[in-house]
Image: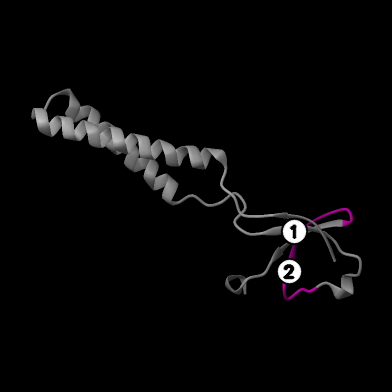
């Protein structure tokens, strides 16, 4: 078995952007709430609560993010199928003579 390439688990740019968005919204929401408490009401109350609510929603979506590829995959060329280790690897896809395999972990068994 000849390994041609390996793909590790990763997050997309949109998921990372959502994480930064949460941080910014949370910071602005907390500043708005502090402004509201200090001035006892007013427009800051609505802005702070709205931004804090948006930040909480974004935080919830970021917490439940799953990587685009949740496991390590390898593109391989199998020269002798009888020597392929089915205990260690699982074939996910075949593209001509190239196979995409993933490593079998204890959680997969």
Number of numbered discs overlaid on the protein picture: 2
Among the 4 quarters of the image, the one containing residue 79: bottom right
Q: Which residue is mark 1?
A: 74
Q: Quadrant of residue 41?
A: top left
Mark 2: few, some, or many residues within 10 Å (few <14, many ≥20)? some
Residue 92, given in percent of the width and then of the height, sits at: 74, 60
40 w.r.t. 99: above or below:
above
Placement of 26 over or under 96, stated as above or below: above
First in sequence: mark 2 vs mark 1: 1
Say which mark, if any, is on residue 89: 2
Looking at the rendering, in which quadrant would you find the N terminus? bottom right
Residue 28 painted magenta: no
> Disc 2 vs disc 1: Cβ atoms closer than 8 Å?
yes
- Range drawn in magenta: 85-97
Mark 1: few, some, or many residues within 10 Å (few <14, many ≥20)? Answer: many
Foreground label between 2 and 1: 1
Q: Is residue 83 above or below residue 12?
A: below
As drawn, the label of residue 109 is: none
The single residue placed furthest to the top in the displayed view is 43
């Amino acid at each position: 078995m000849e390994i041609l390439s390996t793909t590790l688990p990763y997050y997309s740019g949109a998921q990372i952007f959502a994480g930064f968005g949460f941080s910014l919204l949370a910071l602005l929401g907390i500043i708005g709430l502090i402004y509201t408490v200090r001035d006892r009401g007013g427009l800051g109350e609505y802005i702070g609560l709205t931004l804090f609510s948006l930040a909480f929603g974004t935080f919830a979506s970021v917490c439940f993010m799953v990587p685009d590829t949740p496991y390590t995959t390898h593109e391989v060329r199998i020269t002798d199928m009888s020597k392929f280790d089915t205990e260690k690897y699982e074939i996910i896809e075949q593209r001509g003579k190239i196979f995409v395999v993933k490593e079998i972990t204890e959680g997969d068994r």
